[in-house]
């Protein structure tokens, strides 16, 4: 695909300047008596691809859910592009949320809508895009994820891998600055994983969308990441470029974890 | 007891009148119960307790008192407060109101059956709450509950003879009137009995077919 026809080219908005985009200050999240995040400080610069790794239950997914405002922190502040996401009034939350897109483990496509409408629904009703423009953009995105012929299908007709690629197109259609990827291949049959990861690699390579990715696909993490964060029990215990984390981890827990999953 | 076909023939014009009234009551009662039940179900999800609590009490009260008592109340007590409707209107309102307290539970189950991931996807796409309801949640919830709502329509059909007690001449009312005038009970009552089964049995087959198609 040549650069000037790439529908992703102008996706990220405003342009990336490498400044701080996401900031967690002393964020604590508990579920019942269980402290999932414990005074977490954490930041991501715009345009970076950050992968969160670590054992299950270490709080990685919670970070994405906090950013997407699907859950609220018990303590601390979260800032996105200089605007506070928590605590904040509902109107401001909606404003900040416009910059963030999310792809879920279970796809969560709307089963009552065609593939095309899944993608155009939010651009039309939230961004106020004219319907034909939204459809035009949706078809370009479907082309990008290799599903141009599925525009009129319903999600239940698609394989898991196809559904997940539609979900990626749906998130991108909102032109988010930040894309959150929550174990997007964990629910897929093994033979469908590669197709989804290829699409994401493509997006990582050709756009400057900031990506925050929770995954157990270590090769993928190594390929796309600028930075890898190793989580354990609600803390970042080690972080750095993928070569360092995968090549010469400092922390024993990181070594244990990597030898278990690689 | 002997069967008199001429009595059947004589009764038929009255039967058609009664059938028309029964179907009117059924259709209008269904429409009211579907719409009002949805309103109740949505009000029960409002965050303020001051909305949920009165709605809960009123609907619980209506659901747990007999439709027959409610019919008498609406027909004989409301006029004392100078609120007067025709018998059929009163009957339709009573049936619709009574059954709305059942359909609200059907809707509630349908709404709760929509996976949390649907709400989360709507939030992630920044859809406004109203749009989330109308475009995402309700279409999925209602699709699931159509068969259950259909079963209540069949129940309602079988409750329409109660309207006779407030002078509505639906099928049973017509049959009774004819019987008392001609002292022939067997033929008119048999005719309407057959009519009920001819409506409700195919309807229940239709519901089962719908269930197979819609609930997956």
Image: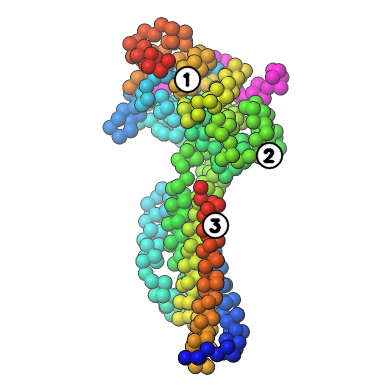
Give the residue at x 71% y 22%.
Answer: A5
The reply to whether the C-beta atoms of the residues labelled 1 and 2 are less than 8 Å apart is no
| Subunit under mark 1 | A
| Subunit under mark 2 | A
Q: Quadrant of residue A204?
A: top right
User: How far separated are the C-alphas under marks 1 and 3?
Assistant: 44 Å
- Along the viewing direction, whichever of A164 and B52 lies nearer the viewer: A164
Residue A113, given in percent of the width and then of the height, sits at 59, 42
* Residue that badge 2 annotates: A131
User: From the viewer's perspective, is the residue at label 1 or at label 3 nearer?
Assistant: 3
Give the residue at x 48% y 62%.
Answer: B151
Q: Secondary structure at mark 2?
A: helix
Q: Secondary structure at mark 3?
A: helix
User: How far separated are the C-alphas under marks 2 and 3?
Assistant: 36 Å
As drawn, the residue found furthest toward the bottom would be B182
* Residue that badge 3 annotates: B209
Asked if labels 2 and 3 share a chain, the reply is: no
* Residue that badge 1 annotates: A217
Segment colored magenta: A1-25
Residue B156, given in percent of the width and then of the height, sits at 48, 69
- Along the viewing direction, whichever of B64 and A67 lies nearer the viewer: B64
Asked if labels 1 and 3 share a chain, the reply is: no
Give the residue at x 43% y 10%.
Answer: A246
User: How far separated are the C-alphas under marks 1 and 2?
Assistant: 37 Å
Residue A153, given in percent of the width and then of the height, sits at 63, 39
Label 2 Cα neighbours within 10 Å, binned few <14 / some 14-19 / many ≥20: some
């Amino acid at each position: 695909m040549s650069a000037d026809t790439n529908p992703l080219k102008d996706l990220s908005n405003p342009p990336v300047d490498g400044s701080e985009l996401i900031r967690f200050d002393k964020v604590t999240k508990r579920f019942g008596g269980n402290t999932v995040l414990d005074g977490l400080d954490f930041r991501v610069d715009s345009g970076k691809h950050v992968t969160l790794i670590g054992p299950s239950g270490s709080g990685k997914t919670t970070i994405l859910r906090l950013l997407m405002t699907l859950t609220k922190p018990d303590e601390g502040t979260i800032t996105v592009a200089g605007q506070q996401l928590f605590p904040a009034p509902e109107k401001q939350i909606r404003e900040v949320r416009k910059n963030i897109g999310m792809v879920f483990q279970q796809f969560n496509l709307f089963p009552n809508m065609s593939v095309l409408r899944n993608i155009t629904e939010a651009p039309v009703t939230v961004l106020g895009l004219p319907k034909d423009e939204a459809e035009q953009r949706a078809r370009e995105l479907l082309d990008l994820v290799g599903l141009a012929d599925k525009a009129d299908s319903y999600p239940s007709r698609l394989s898991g891998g196809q559904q997940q690629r539609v979900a990626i197109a749906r998130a991108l259609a909102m032109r988010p600055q930040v894309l959150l990827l929550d174990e997007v291949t964990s629910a897929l049959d093994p033979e469908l994983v590669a197709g989804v990861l290829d699409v994401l690699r493509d997006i990582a390579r050709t756009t400057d969308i900031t990506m925050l990715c929770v995954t157990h696909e270590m090769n993928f993490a190594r390929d796309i990441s600028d930075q890898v964060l190793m989580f354990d029990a609600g803390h970042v215990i080690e972080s750095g470029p993928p070569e360092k984390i995968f090549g010469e981890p400092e922390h024993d827990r990181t070594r244990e974890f990597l030898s278990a999953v690689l | 007891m002997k069967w008199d076909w001429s009595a059947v023939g004589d009764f038929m014009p009255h039967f058609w009148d009664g059938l028309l009234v029964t179907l009117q009551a059924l259709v209008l009662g269904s429409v009211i119960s579907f719409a009002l039940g949805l309103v109740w179900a949505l009000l029960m999800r409002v965050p303020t307790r001051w909305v949920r609590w009165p709605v809960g009490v009123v609907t619980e009260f209506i659901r747990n008192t007999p439709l027959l008592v409610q019919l008498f109340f609406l027909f004989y007590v409301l006029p004392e407060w100078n609120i007067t409707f025709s018998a059929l209107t009163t009957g339709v309102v009573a049936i619709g109101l009574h059954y709305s307290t059942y359909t609200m539970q059907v809707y509630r189950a349908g709404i709760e059956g929509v996976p949390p991931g649907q709400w989360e996807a709507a939030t992630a796409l920044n859809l406004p709450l109203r749009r989330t309801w109308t475009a995402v949640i309700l279409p999925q919830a209602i699709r699931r509950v159509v068969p259950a709502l259909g079963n209540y329509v069949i129940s309602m059909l079988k409750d329409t003879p109660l309207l006779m007690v407030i002078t509505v001449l639906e099928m049973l009312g017509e049959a009774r009137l004819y019987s008392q005038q001609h002292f022939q009970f067997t033929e008119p009552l048999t005719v309407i009995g057959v009519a009920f089964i001819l409506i409700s049995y195919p309807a229940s087959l239709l519901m089962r077919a719908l269930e197979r198609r819609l609930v997956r």
